[in-house]
Amino acid sequence: MTTLLLTHEAFLGHAVPEGHPERPDRLRILKQVFSDDAFAALQRGEAPLGGLELAELAHPADYAALIEKLSPARGFAGIDSDTLMSPGTLEATFRALGGAARAVDAVFTGEASNAFLAARPPGHHAETQRAMGFCFFNTAAVAARHAQKVHGAERIAIIDWDVHHGNGTQDIFWTDRDVMYASTHQMPLYPGTGERSETGEHGTIVNAPLRAGDGGEAFRAAMDGLILPRIAAHRPDLIIISAGFDAHRRDPLANLELEAGDFVWATRQLMAVADKHCEGRVVSVLEGGYDLIGLAESAAAHVTALMER
């Protein structure tokens, strides 16, 4: 089996105003990265077009329909000052959901060992009924619900190493016994959530906040000391990674000091847990990462580690 890389040209169609950090160049640089001969062994596919039925796995039908209705014919429609829709946004968001479901299908049917979805916009700030932080629908949450609905997964672990806390994913699974959400992130920083005391109704929320200036040593200690043992104890049928790379030292939106090697280490640790508990099933979805060099280095390192299976 191989690692499956999913992406689509439609992700470039989600336009943003000049100067916005979540820009199409993020996907262009990844296309360039994965065209290198080092990634020739990747299995590749296009993210299929999902729709409201996938969005409604993690969001109420009226919210999903509202996002569809807000899609503009021209210009921009603003959810807030950072979260704007262009005419190409709706297809991009629906293909992100379709790609997440396709990745889950691939690892459960044995088509691929693991999968990486290179998509935009990101999703982990999208709460149950609220778009924010560049996010409209929660891609990782939809992947988890799809795994439960279609493949009978009982327990799922979502690990989020984006530098910003995934308040949306935490919100969606706050009352869930079977889906664990675990996050490393910088605090204080947008969106202001993610304290250690936030544990959910059933103790399945695990937050390990880091401080500005923390680097690989602190990140690895948080993973080793808290997150990895909790994920292993959860015995997941699937591990989903919200793979934001804005904790890289070059990123302009935060102040952590991670290097590409830290993401390699974390990927390998999670793959080891997956090998033990869920037949190696790992699905990784792109979240943040706004310095193009840092994003390229980190995503390349992450996918290279995934390809070791």
Image (spheres, grey):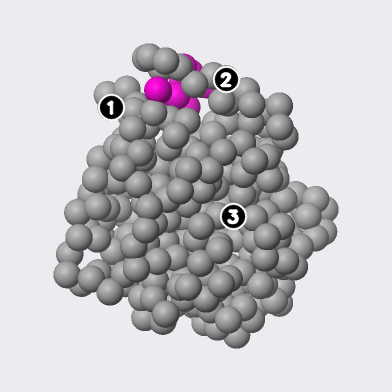
Which residues are drawn in magenta?
77-87
Q: Quadrant of residue 183?
A: bottom right
Separation of residues labelled 1 and 2 (CA atoms): 26 Å
Local secondary structure at mark 2: helix
Separation of residues labelled 3 and 2 (CA atoms): 23 Å
* Residue 7 against residue 228 in the figure, above or below: above
Instruction: Give the residue type at disc 3.
Output: Ala
Q: Is residue 111 visible?
A: yes
Magenta run includes residue 207: no
Spot occupied by residue 4 in the image (x, y as percentages of width and height): 40, 66
Quadrant of the drawing holding the N terminus: bottom left
Among the two numbered marks 1 and 3 on one chain, the one whose residue lies closer to the N terminus: 1
Q: Residue at x 42, y 15 (%)?
A: 73
Q: Is 227 positioned to the left or the right of 25 in the image? A: right
Among the two numbered marks 3 and 2 on one chain, the one whose residue lies closer to the N terminus: 2
* Residue 231 against residue 242 in the figure, above or below: below
* Residue 71 against residue 258 in the figure, above or below: above
Question: Which-is-in-front pick, marks 1 and 3?
Answer: 3
Spot occupied by residue 115 in the image (x, y as percentages of width and height): 44, 65
Residue on which disc 2 sits: 69
Q: Residue at x 51, y 48 (%)?
A: 98
Residue on which disc 3 sits: 143
Spot occupied by residue 250 in the image (x, y as percentages of width and height): 28, 50
Quadrant of the drawing holding the C terminus: bottom left
Residue on which disc 1 sits: 19
Label 1 crowd (10 A; few <14 / some 14-19 / many >=20): few
Label 3 crowd (10 A; few <14 / some 14-19 / many >=20): many
